[in-house]
Each structure stands twice: as C-alpha cells, then as structure tokens.
Amino acid sequence: MKRRNFIQTSSVIMSGITVFPTSAYSLFKKNDKYISGRPPVSQRKFKSFAVEEKIKEVKASIKNKELAWMFENCYPNTLDTTVNYKIINGIPDTFVITGDINAMWLRDSTAQVWPYISLINEDDKLKLLIKGVINRQTKCILIDPYANAFNYGKDGSHWESDNTEMKPELHERKWEIDSLCYPVRLAYNYWKLTGESDIFDSQWLLAAKLILKTFKEQQRKESDGPYHFTRCTTKPTDTLSGNGYGNPVNPIGLICSSFRPSDDATFLSFLIPSNYFAINTLKQISVIANVIYKDIDLANETISLSKEIEDAIKKHAIQDHLIYGNILAYEIDGFGNKLFMDDANIPSLLSLPYLGVLNKDNELYQNTRNFILSKNNPWFFEGKFARGIGGPHVGKNMVWPMSIIMQALTSNNEQEIISCINSLINTHAGTGFVHESFNVDNPYKYTRSWFAWANTLFGELIVNIHKNYPEILKKIH
C-alpha cells in the first residue's frame, strides 16, 4: 500500500531514506485547507465508532489547524490501514501489520492498538478487535517464543536463510525480551479494564508458562540456552557475535536479550530497559496465575523471578555519573562493563514511566533522563529543526519522532511538552504523518512513510494532553 500516489512520483529514495522536495508540502495543503491523509471510508480496514468520536472531541479542542490535521491522520492509522480482523471458529482473530512491512511484530501490534484500549468499554467491536490481537499473539508465542515477527500463515520469509531455527510461520526470529512483555501488558490491561477473563484460556496459560521458561533459559545460569542467531549481512547490528550467542555474560540474575526493540543486536546482552519491562510482566502473570488460574506455583515462580531481576538491576546497573549522579546503564554484561546511552525504540530508558516501571519523579529516573536527553548520550542529536534520540538502526543525525513523543509523554513540564509538539509539527515533511526517523537538519529526508506504531503513538500523545493538559492544545498556534 502507498500513502498517496504523488509520494511515489515526487520523492527520491536514497539508501532507504525518502527525500522529499520542499514543494511537496503544497500537495497536502490548498487554500489553507489540509487534505485528509486517511483512506476513503470504504477502504479503511476497521471502523470504530468510539475512535471516530474521540477524534471529533479532541480535534475540536486543538487551535492549531496543522496539529489537528496531523492528529486526525495519525490517531486512527492502525485501524485505517494495518488490521486484518476475522472471527475464526467463533473466536476473534486480529493480525496487525506494522505498515510498510507485511508482518506482525508482537511488540508493534500491542503498541499499535494500545492507544485505543481506554475506549473498549464504549465500543464492542473495538473490544473484539483487541481481543483478537490477544488471541493471535498467544498463538504466535506458542509457535516460537524466541521470534519477534510473524506471518499471517505459513508463508515463509526472505529471512528464512538466517542461521537459526526458522519456521514457515515466522517472518523473523530475533530474540527480544520485550516481544514477550508487550502481549502480557495488553492482556492484563484488557482484563483490568473490562473485567472479562475469557481471554485467559488453556492456551494463554501455556503461553505464560513458556514466557517464564524462556526468561529463565536466557538468564544463562547453566548454559547459553537453545537460542542462537546469525545472518549473512553487511550490517553488523543485524547479526550476533560469539557464534550466534552474542558477547559473553556473567549470570547475575538478569535476562539476556539478543536484540534491542529496534531489532538491532545488543552489544552487552543484559538490556536494562527490557529487564525492567520484564519485572512488570512477571508481576502481571503472577496476578493472573493467582486470581484466574489458581496456579500458586506459577504465581510464586514469576514473582520470585521478578524480584531477582529487580535486585540485580539495583546491584549491577546503576553508576554514579560525574555530571548526573546515579544513573541507569542501557546495557551491562555482569562482568562490570556498562554501556551508557539510550535508543529511541520502546522499551527505552526514557520510556520507563510510560511502561509503568518507574515513577516520573523517581530520582534515579530523572538523573537518567537528564543524561539521555543531553549530548552525553551518543545517540542524542540536535540540529536546525529538532533535538532528540535516534539509534544505530538508522544512524547518525537521524532523530526518531517516537523519542520526541516519549519525551513529552514522560514530562510534567508544560513548556517541554509544547516544545516537543512544535518539533513534531515542524518535521512531518508536509505529509501529515510522523515517520520512523528524520534528519535533524532536513526533515524532508526521512525513513518509512508508513509506520503505524509511530503514527498511533503520536495520536496517543495528543489524547493524553487533551485529558491532562487541555490548555496546551489552545496555546499552540
């Protein structure tokens, strides 16, 4: 699917980066009227009454026409363009592609529908759609807990030549802790919001036990575990060193993540944001095991592992920085080596309050936040149009809008939030959508014109501001 026909004709593709001429903006705006970037109603993948009402409500409160236009384009983008919803044998099933990649990531699929979860009690169809995502994710985990991305069926993949245990249902098999955390987050919060527990069937219990088993395997206390991965590639972050097991670790209770949520290989395998995320995941499984399944053994095992991880982070992942005081490392190896940086993809150190892991006002988080939003973070960039965090996945001077959105979502400072929103308005390159990344000195040089996670996350930000800081939407002109 292409966003608009003129995107194909008025852009130039250079090394995966789309470069738009500045005149492209005029194609979206005529006589001060913004042309909708949404598909025609008849071509939308899914229609939600509650989402459409929320768009009307929030848009009416936004003074800036360009911001209102971006919100209306972005917030429903997941539903408009990426979901395949069906009832199979009486059970909802929802396959969610990322956008321009025709595959379902466990991480992205949760993140893409997350901004709608607060509306599910107002819209039964939307509730079934998200229930279908949970059901599909359960199936995926049972196919292979080490895979990050899946096909709709047994379709095979252009990554099937990877040196790992590929199956025809897999699009990609990069082991990332967060791939098993996001589905639990979605299921747990669906249950808490609706009070409906029928998603927790025998299959979900098997998946929960498999998550626990996989986490324990990747603590690597007795061996490197069953997972290995190498790829024939010229991009070093797309494969693992150490014969497919990554750099060595000293088993200290943390979980190894071979890849980051960017799908880039970790340098030191104990990825701290993802281990933090796993703490919450295990606590949520423990509650579900106790309340729903009455499985005391599973409840105790998961809560015990969560405490082990939390203690290990406190002992091994905090360092007294010369400027910022005690801060969190991004990755460690248990031998004393620590990598200090942050990546735009979520879970990140910046996103910890958003994920419910640390409070915004926590001193350790604030110190870490000050560090990663400074030039002391090697992947923080500042240019003519924006400042924010990028990552090795795209490279130097390419900021991810996702990091700017997350900075706003984790801030209590009105001026900081306004600054973030203005940056997003100034860097969408006239498309009305946010992208994977853009050049800080030329926002018309960007990657991925159709990246639904970033679009919907932007919509979530505006809804959040409408709820908690409504005066901000009136101040942005």
Image: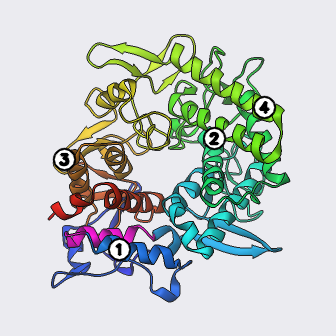
The residue most toward the bottom is: 42
Quadrant for the C terminus, please: bottom left
Between discs 3 and 1, the one toward the N terminus? 1
Q: Tell me the quarter of the picture where residue 319 sits.
A: top left
Q: Nearer the viewer, mark 1 or mark 4?
A: 1
Badge 2 marks a residue whose secondary structure is: loop
Count residues near mark 2 (Cα–Cα under 10 Å), then give few for <14, some for 14-19, many for 20+.
some
Q: Tell me the quarter of the picture where residue 246 sits.
A: top right
Q: Which residues are magenta?
A: 62-76
Q: Which residue is mark 2?
A: 231
Q: Nearer the viewer, mark 1 or mark 2?
A: 1
The circle on residue 57 is 1
- Characterize the magenta stretch by its predominant secondary structure: helix
Could you tell me the amino acid type at mark 2?
Answer: Arg
Count residues near mark 4 (Cα–Cα under 10 Å), then give few for <14, some for 14-19, many for 20+.
few
Between discs 3 and 4, the one toward the N terminus? 4
Q: Which residue is mark 4?
A: 226
How many numbered dots are placed on residues in this image? 4
Q: Residue at x 41, y 56 (%)?
A: 16
Coordinates of residue 470 in the picture (x, y in percent): 27, 60
